[in-house]
Amino acid sequence: MLIGEYRHTIDGKRRIALPAKFRRALGKKVVITRGLDSCLFVFSQTQWRSIVEKLNRLSMGQADSRAFGRYLFAGAAEIDIDQLGRILIPSELARHAKLTTKTVLIGVNDRCEVWDEQLWDTYRASVEQEADRVAEKLGEIGVL
C-alpha cells in the first residue's frame, strides 16, 4: 500500500526521485500516465495489468468507456526506475500536470500521484474544507 506525502524537486531533465517506500512497492519498472485533477498516476506493472483487465471488461460500444481508455492509454509510458531511484517524466505528461521544479508525490493506496506543489497545496486545501461533508456522504453508504 502506498501512503504519505513527499515533497521533491524535478530536475532539468524531468527526473524525479521516488521515495524509498514507494520504490519497494512499485518495483523496478512503472507505468506513468495522465491522472485526474491535473496530476500524474504512477502504477506498478502488476497494478497496471489489473487496471487493463478491468478496462477490457468495459463495452467498446459505450462512448465513455472508449474515451477514458483513450485518455489513460494514449498518455501512458513504461518507465524504468534508475539506480538512484528516479523516474523520467515524459515531456507531454509533465505539461499535462503543469509540473514545475517543486513537486509532491502522494501515496494513494494502489498508486503514486505526482503533483505540481502549488496545484497540490490548492487542491488539498479545498478538499480539507469539504472533508466533513464528504465523510457524511460516505457514512450514508456505509464506507465510514
Image: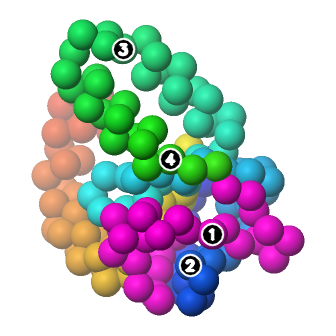
Q: CA distance from mark 3 to mark 2?
A: 34 Å
**Which residue is the site of mark 2?**
14
Q: CA distance from mark 1 to mark 3?
A: 31 Å
Q: Which residues are magenta?
A: 79-106
Q: CA distance from mark 4 to mark 1?
A: 13 Å
**Which residue is the site of mark 1?**
88
- Callout 2: helix, strand or loop? loop
Please provide percent x and percent y for residue 74. Answer: 42, 43
As drawn, is 132 to the left or to the right of 2?
A: left
Please tell me in which quadrant of the rendered image residue 40 appears: bottom left
- Kind of residue sitting beneath label 3: Leu
- Callout 3: helix, strand or loop? loop
Residue 38 can be seen, yes or no: yes
Residues at discs 4 and 1 in contact (Cβ within 8 Å) = no
Please tell me in which quadrant of the rendered image residue 37 appears: bottom left
Q: Residue at x 66, y 45 (%)?
A: 44
Please provide percent x and percent y for residue 72. Answer: 40, 41
Please provide percent x and percent y for residue 50. Answer: 58, 27
Q: Residues within 10 Å of mark 3 (few under 14, many from 20)?
A: few
- Furthest-right residue in this view: 83
Tell me if residue 1 is in the magenta stretch.
no
Residues at discs 3 and 4 in contact (Cβ within 8 Å) = no
- Callout 1: helix, strand or loop? strand
Q: Which mark is residue 58?
A: 3
Which one is earlier in the sequence, the residue at label 1 or at label 3?
3
Which one is earlier in the sequence, the residue at label 4 or at label 2?
2
Please provide percent x and percent y for residue 135. Answer: 23, 47
**Which residue is the site of mark 4?**
76
Q: CA distance from mark 3 to mark 4?
A: 19 Å
Nearer the observer, 73 or 54:
73
